[in-house]
Amino acid sequence: MSRLLRFLPLLVLATFVVAVAWRLSRPADEEIRSQLIGQPVPAFALAPALPGRPSLASSDLTSGQPRMINVFASWCVPCIAEAPLLMELKRQGVAIDAVAVRDRPEDVAAFLSRHGDPFDRIGADPESKVQLALGSSGVPESFIVDGRGIIRYQHMGPIEPDDLPVIMREWEAAK
Amino acid sequence: MIAEAGLAALWLAAALAGLQLALAFGLGGEKGRSVSTIRGVALAQGLLTLLAFGALISVFLNSDMSVLLVAENSHSEKPWLYKFAGAWGNHEGSMLLWVAVLALSGAVVALFERRLDDRTLGATLGAQAALALGFFAFLLFASNPFERLDPAPIDGRGLNPLLQDPGLAFHPPTLYLGYVGLSVAFSLAVGGLIRGNFGSAIARAMRPWVLAAWVLLTLGITAGSYWAYYELGWGGWWFWDPVENASLMPWLAATALLHSVNVLAARDGLRAWTMMLALIAFSMSMVGTFLVRSGILTSVHSFAVDPTRGTFILALLAIYIGGALILFALRIAHVKEGAPFELVSREGGLVANNLILSVILGIVFVGTLYPLIAEALSGEKLSVGPPYFDSVASPMALVLAALMMIAPQLKWRRDAAPILPRLAPGLLVAVAALAATFILTPNIGMLPRLGLAIGAGLLPASLLPLFGRSLRRTPLSIWGMAIAHLGVAVAILGMASDSAFTEEKLAAARPGETVSVGPWLVEFRQVMPVAGPNWTALEAELRASKGSGAVVLNPQSRYFPSPPTTTNEAAIDTSWNGQLYAVLGERDEQGRWQLRLWWKPFVTLIWLGGILIALGGAIALVGRMVRERRQRIRGEEAFL
């Protein structure tokens, strides 16, 4: 048996122990952040989620003004909880567009008529392609994109009342 | 009082483990005389640890809330069985169970092992004591199960409802018996390496432990898989979750060891490799325990996250595995190669088996730890999921299954006779099955298709070693092998059928509506509230029929007040050709209920196969023990 082969298991053990000791010394950060913060929005062009409403494309996000993108779905319960806060953000002057993930037009329409409609543009993302391209791991999620199309901020999960000041600060910073 | 008695027994047992270690390697360990002393110490240590575990069960059964562990994990209104099982349904208790099994295994070796010379046996018991000592220290200094709580609360917090299930009450002990049974193989290998004894005597001493541990691991994994299947309500039977992998890795190593130890015992071949596997199998048990107990990898099972404890077990693991591997690297150069064999031979087949199992073990090991290593190196977060494991491990498993069609029929040392006639029955059935899948179900994936073909071919092939023999005089170990291999075929058929033919239906339905899935028409009749001993639930009444006759399914959404948790209890109807699986979800605003229905043809074969595999192992174990006993008696008679 060659010398290398004899010591190989020890090498594997050492790798294991070092990796695990590293993790023990630095508890995991459970959140999954998008790799795209500070990066331009990936290029996409979605079909409209509702007939007669403007759809969303990445070119809409380089208008010189910041915009918020809300990734949502009519089948998502936390999105219902979030809806009034999006209305509040719109009232405070935040321009919001939406990506409707794996949804049907009639369901989206019902959702918006029931829970409020803060969106300027709504794109349909039937296969979660844009959602994944944005580095979003679930619904709802919101991104703030500055006027040059660079992603500045990511909010995971439903926006809650406590989050409003942070989001407004990021919004101002993106201007 | 009982708690203090338990703690005292634990300290005493730890002291005896220290004494056992000293006797084995220090004070006159070379002399045969002291081995009987070591045997006595090992026995006493085992009994004291058993006593400590008994004390823990007693405080749980009496709901002694002044014991911190009971207050945190039990509740006086809990059903009797769960008070009992609650003793090990938590970190401290399960570690005490772990150590109790370890110490008892040492005691059993001390009592019954007669095949080994005194020096090797002494070193083996010394190694076992060294293992026990570390885990005693872990219990006493970092996980004391008998800690008191003052003042005592009026009642306890309860046991995680997911764990309140009769199957799960016995799932962890079964797995632990399997994990820790491998410790004896580890200690025997260490003892052999220290004393320079690598012969077939070690292998024969090791074999019953490996077989027994493997049978229990097989049962534990099978039960755990079924538990996850019906309790988590996701319709899947294996999730490649880190905790599942933690139990699969020792099983893979033990499976390889089980086969190579036979080569060593019967042919005195594969010496170094068998020693290595014996070390790796228990190392994987410790790694598994560590992964589960430290909560270091995110998992659906995640139990306890505690860096102090994690560091403690990591240090133990590094010392034990590292020490054994260094010993191996230094000593193995002196091992003479065992008996030679040719490529096409029983040994050759077993080597191929070992290589493939080792590759699968490597795949699972890397996949389980890769997210951790990737994040340590690049800061990048990722998770490794079923697509990786399925696409890499499944083809290897199928190659292994194909090998099983011929290898058990090969002769030891060299086999010059033509292979094809012996391979023909299995091959014909496999080809016929493959053709049938192309004709009947052209649209299934390649892996399930090959799984169906190879599984079908292995059915007759696994029984071929029994042919041409007088069945009455066939040794039990051959029967065991055939049954275990048949079990593999059955399990593969179940897995392939599940992934090829499962139909899933997600529906939002109002009472009175009908949903169809597979051959079933499921009528959603009503939702009623029901109450159990320590939970309340909403229970759906589903009437499922296919043509004539009907079955009623009652999936529940259960609420446990203590601790407050909601679980989904799937309802499953089992028929000969599959299972109808129903889960009740939430109610939406329009009064529709989420229903998830699956029709899973022949899915039960997966667990039936698992049981057959374990049964085969148990038969082989009994066969080996009976035969050795007979030989010993015959040997003693000859001596007289």
Image (cartoon, coloured by chain):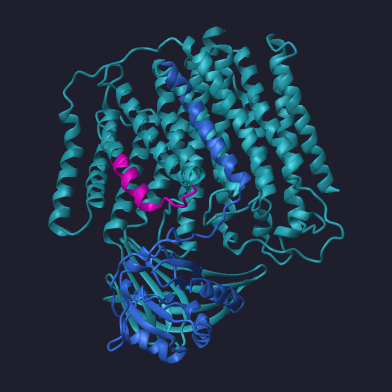
Chain colours: A blue, B cyan
Q: Is residue B361 left or right of residue B180?
A: left
What span is colored magenta in the figure?
B379-398
Kindly tell me whether residue A87 is visible in this rendering. yes
The x, y position of residue A57, in whole percent, is 31, 74
Q: Is residue B315 left or right of residue B253?
A: right
Q: Main secondary structure of the magenta part?
A: helix
Picture layout, residue B342 above or below residue B2:
above
The x, y position of residue B295, in whole percent, is 59, 50
Determine the residue positioned at 79% across, 38% down: B9
Kindly tell me whether residue B115 is visible in this rendering. no
Between B279 and A67, the one nearer to me in the picture: A67
Q: Is residue B426 left or right of residue B412?
A: left
Quadrant of the image occupied by residue B352? top left
Determine the residue positioned at 86% across, 48% down: B1
Residue B384 belongs to magenta span: yes
Residue B147 belongs to magenta span: no
Determine the residue positioned at 12% across, 56% down: B439
The x, y position of residue B246, in whole percent, is 50, 44
Picture layout, residue B413 above or below residue A131:
above
Determine the residue positioned at 69% across, 43% down: B96
Quarter of the image that includes the C terminus of chain B: top right
How many marks the image carries: the answer is 0
- Farthest bottom residue in view: A113
